């Protein structure tokens, strides 16, 4: 699907109507390739989103308040705050039939322009000073990437190169005939239009051909007269001059498969929508997904992976250093045997064989005396004995750390808002996996999910480690029912019984919630353990929310929110 020149023209008209003259109240970066602005205009707040992503570059008004994704301010964001935040949008200009829009913002420092270039993998968002110098951009393009056009701070802004195609306003019947005569008769007409006329996307070309010939895939050989093509083409351009658009979308089942600022008659069935922004947002939301906090999660996820790798390496080192009790005792025995057979050892001897039930071969250092060789074995014995005592608890601690990090990873995946993401980050800082920021990480602000079952029982769901701790050890009574997915990180779920017997329907509902808010969410069937809260205990040395339980039973359910 193409965000083409006509779509940009429709967006430009909508923005002139909705935000021209408005004041920019907030500037943010939803992710590393996007810029968002909150604009107050005509007594309302509007939210403008521009993305330079290679696969879903776009520009439109968003239906909801934009969320900040980039946690750390970037040079571009700092410049946007200086030259755009607090300014007034005084002009919105689109070079005719180009997928570029220039938004001029007037502020105390003068007038800067935010140029949004929606051109596939070449898409960019560039902040340009009044004198035409680039301040910064979402993507920096150096000489090694492009000889024609460098997008770097303090370089002169050069517009994208014009296409070497026919200007859409110069299309005549004669030129259309020439275009078609230059291609194979079996070639689709729409391909010829896209290849020869500037600003024409495949979707627009197919629509022109469908309106003229009744078949969007018609071949050149099927064109008896060129005039219907010209009339359909000129009809498609009329909204550009008249500024009247009819945005539409096409659905296949529940999924949007196309959008345009004009009726998509080529699909047979299409829906008219209120605005082009609504159409663009609905379509690209399917591609981008619903995770508005992806950028905020990224840094925390990387911190968890780094911590996990450190603990994993530590565990492997401990496992390599681990010795059995038999190996420890063998070192002691070798030292004793050297002393017992010292009279048999000759100077420079490299090994000693002791005739036990199973002959014992002892390596010797020829430069040492028998007593010194024995002392060396006794020293190794003491170290090995200490290791045999110290390593198992350290290994157990490493295993608990990995379990806790797995839980934090699940917490992050389940986090539904920024406070819950911050809680995971705070847990990492408290456990010493990351450095705590100067601005102390605030945690504990989110609340467990509370659900009333169909039988009238209150069900509490802890959606992260902190909430699990609260649900299990602060809100649950000893005789309340406690549930958790078997063998996987996830929610602690508590059914408040108040002395009543829990019906099967409520038990199943609570188990389905436990399965849904867990690492096993994607499974068809999940085993969920349940027991009374009195049989749940914290694991000594484990992180918040790590527990063990007894007297448990198991129920198999499908995850359900």
Image: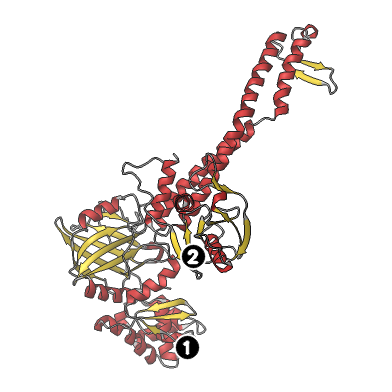
Residue nearest the observer in this picture, 127 or 202: 127
- Give how far across and how far down residue 355 sits, in percent: 85, 17
> Which quarter of the picture shows residue 100?
bottom left
Residue nearest the observer in this picture, 527 or 41: 527
Q: Residue at x 35, y 71 (%)?
A: 164
Circle 1 SS class? loop
- Give how far across and how far down residue 354 sits, in percent: 82, 17
Q: Residue at x 57, y 53 (%)?
A: 488
**Mark 1 or mark 2: whose residue is earlier in sequence:** 1
- Give how far across and how far down residue 358 sits, in percent: 84, 23
Residue topped by disc 1? 215
Mark 1 neighbour class, 10 Å CA radius: few under 14, some 14 to 19, many 20 or more: some
User: How many marks can you see?
Assistant: 2
Q: CA distance from mark 1 to mark 2?
A: 60 Å
The reply, left or right, for residue 447 in relation to residue 322 is left
Q: Is residue 233 visible?
A: yes
* Quadrant holding the N terminus: bottom left
Mark 2 neighbour class, 10 Å CA radius: few under 14, some 14 to 19, many 20 or more: some
The reply, left or right, for residue 339 in relation to residue 524 is right
In the rendered view, would you say 61 is above or below 400? below
The residue lying furthest to the front in this view is 499
Residue topped by disc 2? 457
The reply, left or right, for residue 223 in relation to residue 376 is left
The residue lying furthest to the bottom in this view is 224
Circle 2 SS class? loop
């Amino acid at each position: 699907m193409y965000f083409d020149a006509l779509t940009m023209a429709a967006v430009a008209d909508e923005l002139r109507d909705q935000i021209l003259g408005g004041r920019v109240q907030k500037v943010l970066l939803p992710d590393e390739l996007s810029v968002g602005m909150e604009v107050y205009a005509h007594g309302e707040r509007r939210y403008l989103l521009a993305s330079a992503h290679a696969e879903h570059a776009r520009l439109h008004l968003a239906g909801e308040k934009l969320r900040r994704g980039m946690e750390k301010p970037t040079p571009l964001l700092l410049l946007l705050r200086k030259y755009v935040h607090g300014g007034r949008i005084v002009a919105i200009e689109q070079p005719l039939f180009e997928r570029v829009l220039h938004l001029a913002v007037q502020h105390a420092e003068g007038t800067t322009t935010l140029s949004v270039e929606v051109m596939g993998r070449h898409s960019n968002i560039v902040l340009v000073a009044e004198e035409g110098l680039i301040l910064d951009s979402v993507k920096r393009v150096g000489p090694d990437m492009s000889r024609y056009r460098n997008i770097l701070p303090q370089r002169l802004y050069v517009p994208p190169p014009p296409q070497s195609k026919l200007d859409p306003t110069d299309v005549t019947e004669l030129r259309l005939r020439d275009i078609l005569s230059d291609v194979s008769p079996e070639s689709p007409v729409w391909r010829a239009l896209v290849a020869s006329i500037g600003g024409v996307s495949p979707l627009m070309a197919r629509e022109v051909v469908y309106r003229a010939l009744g078949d969007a895939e018609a071949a050149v050989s099927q064109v008896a007269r060129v005039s219907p093509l010209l009339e359909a083409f000129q009809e498609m351009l009329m909204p550009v001059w008249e500024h009247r658009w009819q945005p539409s979308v096409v659905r296949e089942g529940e999924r949007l498969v196309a959008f345009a600022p004009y009726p998509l008659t080529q699909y047979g069935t299409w829906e008219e929508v209120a605005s082009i922004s609504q159409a663009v947002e609905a379509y690209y939301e399917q591609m981008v997904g619903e995770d508005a906090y992806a950028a905020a999660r990224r840094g925390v996820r990387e911190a968890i992976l780094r911590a996990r790798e450190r603990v994993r390496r530590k565990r492997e080192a401990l496992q390599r250093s681990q010795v059995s009790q038999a190996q420890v005792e063998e070192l002691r025995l070798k030292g004793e045997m050297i002393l017992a057979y010292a009279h048999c050892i000759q100077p420079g001897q490299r090994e000693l064989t002791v005739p036990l039930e199973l002959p014992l071969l002892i390596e010797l250092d020829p430069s040492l005396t028998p007593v010194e060789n024995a002392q060396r074995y006794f020293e190794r014995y003491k170290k090995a004995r200490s290791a045999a005592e110290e390593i198992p608890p350290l290994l157990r601690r490493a295993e608990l750390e990995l379990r806790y990090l797995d839980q934090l990873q699940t917490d992050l995946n389940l986090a539904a808002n920024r406070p819950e993401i911050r809680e995971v980050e705070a847990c990492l800082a408290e456990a010493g996996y990351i450095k705590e920021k100067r601005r102390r990480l605030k945690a504990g602000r989110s609340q467990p999910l509370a659900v009333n079952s169909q039988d009238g029982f209150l069900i509490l769901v802890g959606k992260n480690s902190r909430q699990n701790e609260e649900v299990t050890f602060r809100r649950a009574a000893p005789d309340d029912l406690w549930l958790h997915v078997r063998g996987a990180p996830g929610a602690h779920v508590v059914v408040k019984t108040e002395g009543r017997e829990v019906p099967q329907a409520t038990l199943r509902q609570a188990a389905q919630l436990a399965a849904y808010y867990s690492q096993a969410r994607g499974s068809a069937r999940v085993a969920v353990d349940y027991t009374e809260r009195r049989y749940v205990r914290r694991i000594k040395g484990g992180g918040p929310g790590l527990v063990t339980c007894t007297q448990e039973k198991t129920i198999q359910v499908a995850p359900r929110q």
